[in-house]
Amino acid sequence: MQPNPIIGTELPRKARSGKGIFRRENLDGWLFLSVSLIGYILFRFIPIIFSFVLSFSEWNLVSGLRGIRFTGLENFIEQWSDTWFLHSLVNTFYFSVVSVPISIALSLLAAVIVNESIYFKGFVRLLLYSPHISSMVAISIVWAVLYSPSYGPINMFLQSLGISHPPGWISSSAWAMPSLIIMSIWQSVGYNMVIMLAGLQGIPRDYYEAAEVDGAGVLQRFRSITIPLMSPTLFFVMITSVIGSFQIFAQVNILTKGGPGTSTSVLVYYIYNVAFNYNRLGYANSISWVLFVMIFALTLWQWRQQKKWVHLQ
């Protein structure tokens, strides 16, 4: 065959078959995936399997792998007579049930306000979103100062209003969990607001204009147009918020250490405590799997319930 006069190189002697091209592309695809796949297997899949095996055993890190002693279902049975575990379980549900609805309602309100024509719209968005991107350690330290019962700005302000006995906040068993909830809501509103803002801006303005012509008021338009068309976005925010609320850890570890007593001990904090302070890896893994099953069941239930109130366009 003669050299190609245009590019000056020799054309291939015979064209590749379609099957050969498919194999080459398939191989390229697997090569691109291999790094992520190996990382997933090494750092996700194998630890998950190892965690499941450990949940049926008693083990501490000091004894090495030979120290693993299989105990069957003992760890799972022990949980339900463990007072600390039961308190942590109740506290986790308490935190989730109170914080998630309030956070979603405030986020929606903030998104509706920011979506309208207000002054300094960009600055307000930045102000609301900044807690989400701030360091959790820094935030927790700031809130610890704010919550200080003796010299904290919050109690000093309340005393200036004439309240002689303000709450003890994180030093009080009754107020410690509400204090964590307030802080978590403050941090999550900005992130949820951004997602809801995207949902609001996807609603055609024609709907609002037509409803306004028909005489619908602000509340009626919000109830009949905004809420139904925002329902897929609200469902997404609810799912992620519930899962996130069951995984709260950093603020508890930094701010209260689960106390006073067990008033702010939640499941993830208890798992950490059992594993690394009491060196009971097997028991900690069994609690992790119970937490996983609860989150999975709750998510599945929410997924089935969404058919009753989520309107897909």
Image (spheres, rainbow, N blue to C red):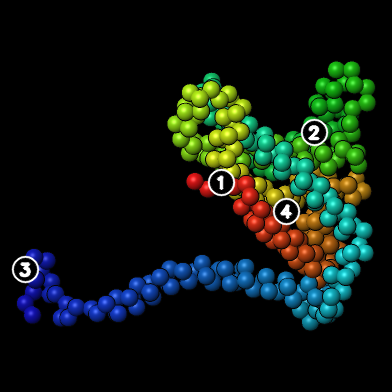
Judged from the image, the secondary structure of the residue bearing numbered disc 4 is loop
Q: What whole-number distance in Å separates the C-alpha atoms at marks 2 and 1?
A: 44 Å
Vertical side of 269 occupied by 47: above or below: below
Residue matched to label 4: 247
Residue at x 89% of width, y 17% of height: 162
183 and 205: which is toward the camera: 205
Q: What whole-number distance in Å separates the C-alpha atoms at marks 1 and 4?
A: 29 Å
Q: Are marks 2 and 3 in contact (CB under 8 Å)?
A: no
Quick check: can you spot residue 263? yes
Going by the image, does 160 lie left or right of 187?
A: right
Q: Are marks 4 and 3 in contact (CB under 8 Å)?
A: no
Going by the image, does 75 lie left or right of 249?
A: right
Going by the image, does 46 lie left or right of 176?
A: left
Q: Earlier in the sequence, mark 2 or mark 3?
A: 3
The amino acid on which the numbered mark 2 sits, given as a three-letter code, is Val
Residue matched to label 2: 145
Judged from the image, the secondary structure of the residue bearing numbered disc 1 is loop
Residue matched to label 3: 5
- Nearer mark to the viewer, of 1 and 4: 1
Q: Earlier in the sequence, mark 1 or mark 3?
A: 3
Q: Are marks 2 and 4 in contact (CB under 8 Å)?
A: no
213 and 247: which is toward the camera: 213
Quadrant assignment, res 69: bottom right
Residue at x 69% of width, y 57% of height: 301
- Nearer mark to the viewer, of 2 and 4: 4
Vertical side of 57 occupied by 146: above or below: above
Residue matched to label 1: 311
The amino acid on which the numbered mark 4 sits, given as a three-letter code, is Gln
Q: Residues within 10 Å of mark 2 (few under 14, many from 20)?
A: some
